[in-house]
Amino acid sequence: MKRFVQILALALVINISATLNAQTTYNLDWGLNINGAAASLTIEPGDTVEWTWVDNLQHNVASTASAQESFNSGLIQGQGSTWSYTFTEVGVNEYVCTPHSSSMFGTITVEEALSIDDKFARNLSFTLSQSTNRLRIQSLMQIDELVIYNLLGVPQIRVNVRDQYAEVDMSSLVSGVYLVKATSQKAQTTFKVVKR
């Protein structure tokens, strides 16, 4: 009986350890003119990035000479094709599609122990078009809600999103500085926008 309890306790410890160390897989689209923020992530050691081809041309995913880790998918062709790589070292990994290096490039930054809020904040990008007053927000995690506050902390606009992309019309707001709070199931971040 004592031996059974020891084995059960060991199995429980192994299961808890595996759960705590579970890593994340991030998906990136990969095709002509996908570069910069749309092809860049900040992740933790052990996280995997999976690239999905969005056109029918031949592409690869190849680290540059300055990258922390060395990887190369080889040439792959076909819309819907995928290739993945698990990053294990802390550092910056610039990469390109060798045949299309001027229009297909990105950076995978690997940092130790990011909180969920940090992962959400670092993988969220936004632009505010001053001509259309439309705020565009993109995230690798699902955005559940956006709230735009004035500097007094009074909510001005609230939008339920439930997607990785959102567009908010800010034309009803006067010119000024606003704080935008983006929330996901387990994370939140706040950033500043200036409407002219």
Image (tube, rainbow, N blue to C red):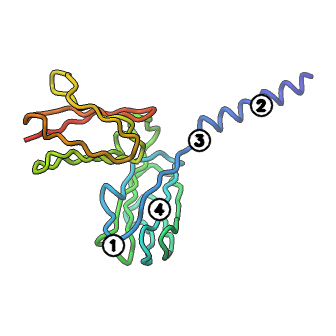
Give me the C-alpha separation between circle 4 and circle 2: 37 Å
- Label 2 Cα crowd, 10 Å radius (few <14 / some 14-19 / many 20+): few
4 and 1 marks in contact (CB < 8 Å): no
Q: Percent x, y for residue 45?
A: 50, 47
Label 3 is placed on what type of residue?
Answer: Ala
Mark 3 → mark 1, Cα distance in angstroms? 33 Å
- Asked which secondary structure carries label 1, the reply is loop
Percent x, y of residue 183: 36, 33
Q: CA distance from mark 4 to mark 1?
A: 16 Å
Residue at point 34%, 68% (across, down): 104
Q: Amino acid at mark 4?
A: Trp
Front label number (2 vs 3):
3
In terms of secondary structure, where does tag 3 sit? loop
Which residue was labeled with disc 3?
Answer: 22
Q: Relative to the observer, which residue lies in front, 2 or 48?
A: 48
- Residue furthest toward the front? 172
Q: Earlier in the sequence, mark 4 or mark 1?
A: 4
Q: Is residue 150 left or right of residue 6?
A: left
Q: CA distance from mark 4 to mark 3?
A: 20 Å
Examine the image and state in which quarter residue 11 appears.
top right
Instruction: For marks 4 and 1, give the one nearer the viewer.
Output: 4
Which residue type carries mark 2? Answer: Leu
Q: Which residue is tagged 4?
A: 51
Chain-order first, disc 3 or disc 1: 3
Mark 2 / mark 1, whichever is N-terminal: 2
Q: Which mark is residue 10?
A: 2
Q: CA distance from mark 2 to mark 1?
A: 50 Å
